[in-house]
Amino acid sequence: MKAHNDEEWLYEITPDRKLLDLKLQEVWRYRDLLFLFVKRDIVTVYKQTILGPLWYFIQPLFTAVIFTLVFNNIANIPTGNVPPFLFNLTGITAWNYFNQSLTQTSNTFTANAGIFGKVYFPRVIMPLKTVISGLFKFGIQLIILIIFYFYFFYQGFELNPNFNLLLFPVYVMMMALLGLGAGMIISAFTTKYRDLTVLVGFATSLLMYISAVPFPLREVSEKVPQLAWLIKYNPMAQIIEGFRYMVLDTGIFSWRAFFYTLGFSVILFLLGLIIFNRTEKNFIDTV
């Protein structure tokens, strides 16, 4: 009796892939695993800490206070009609989401080498779960921002959000794409160059200051014009400025800068995805 070997496989895993393979169908098949990782990140991130989830509140408030004392009270950087604390809190809220997305995805391969070497699933799920779970922390910090917004509003400050507030989901998407794209690129290089993980912490601290987080973009153009181009073409600086503009109606906004930032975010994400997918084929040999 002749054995019948012509079996049809449900899924076939091969190392050969297209240059740009988004793997959306594969990620959708593993959506339960993605949601499981997201839930794990949210539940366990502060599980063995004293203050627990209170760190979600403490970190942005403490940073906003320090920025207010240093940049506004000591350095006398003006914030117009907006209270300096609220001005800083708005920028920090936007920056924290990008910063978390970047730093936590930048070590994807090295941090998950153990599980990657034992079982197969779409590797891109790991950076995706970081960006999605970061929305939970971002949402909590938005609530803090709204509370202080109404506090200062009832104190008599003129705070008027504008119609650009409709672009809020787009700004969140751009922050996610920038952090995800840059993080995937860095994670690909950290498989060979481990010291990049140390550089990321230093680079993000420096990037915060050239992203106009603690000062208005207009102040840079007026006081340090020779460095204005560096901040002007920094997409994260445009996001921070646009975020403040739609929430506080202060700062500089232009559609040209908006579409430049949107295009840069999408291109960086696609480039990061290409490099990430090419690295996952043989990263286990170098980690």
Image (cartoon, rainbow, N blue to C red):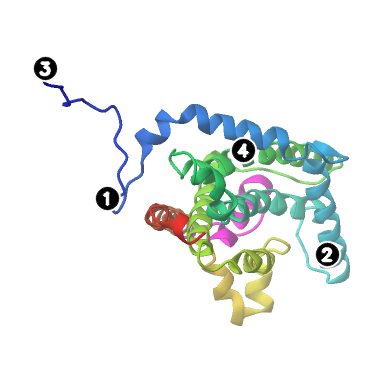
Instruction: Name the secondary structure under disc 2.
Output: helix
Instruction: Name the secondary structure under disc 4.
Output: helix
Decide which of 267, 150 is in the foreground and name it.
267
| CA–CA distance in space, label 2 to label 3 | 87 Å
Mark before the other along the chain sequence, 2 or 3: 3
Query: From the viewer's perspective, is the residue at label 3 or at label 1 nearer?
Result: 3
| CA–CA distance in space, label 3 to label 4 | 56 Å
- Return the residue at label 3: 1
Mark before the other along the chain sequence, 3 or 1: 3
Query: From the viewer's perspective, is the residue at label 1 or at label 4 nearer?
Result: 1
**What amino acid does circle 4 point to?**
Ser
Query: Pointer 3: residues within 10 angstroms few (<14), some, or many (20+)?
Result: few
Mark before the other along the chain sequence, 2 or 4: 2
The residue lying at 88 percent from left, 40 percent from top is: 50
Please state the horizontal and vertical placement of residue 203, each as a whole percent of the image.
64, 68
- Return the residue at label 1: 18
Q: Magenta residues, as a range?
A: 235-257
Query: From the viewer's perspective, is the residue at label 2 or at label 1 nearer?
Result: 1
Say above or below: 210 vs 109. below
Q: Single out the residue that lies furthest toward the left.
A: 2
Q: Single out the residue that lies furthest toward the bottom.
A: 226
Decide which of 2, 240 is in the foreground and name it.
2
Mark before the other along the chain sequence, 1 or 4: 1
Query: Pointer 1: residues within 10 angstroms few (<14), some, or many (20+)?
Result: few
Please state the horizontal and vertical placement of residue 42, each as a whole percent of the image.
68, 35
**What amino acid does circle 1 point to?**
Lys
Specify the label residue 133 is tagged with.
4
The residue lying at 46 percent from left, 55 percent from top is: 284
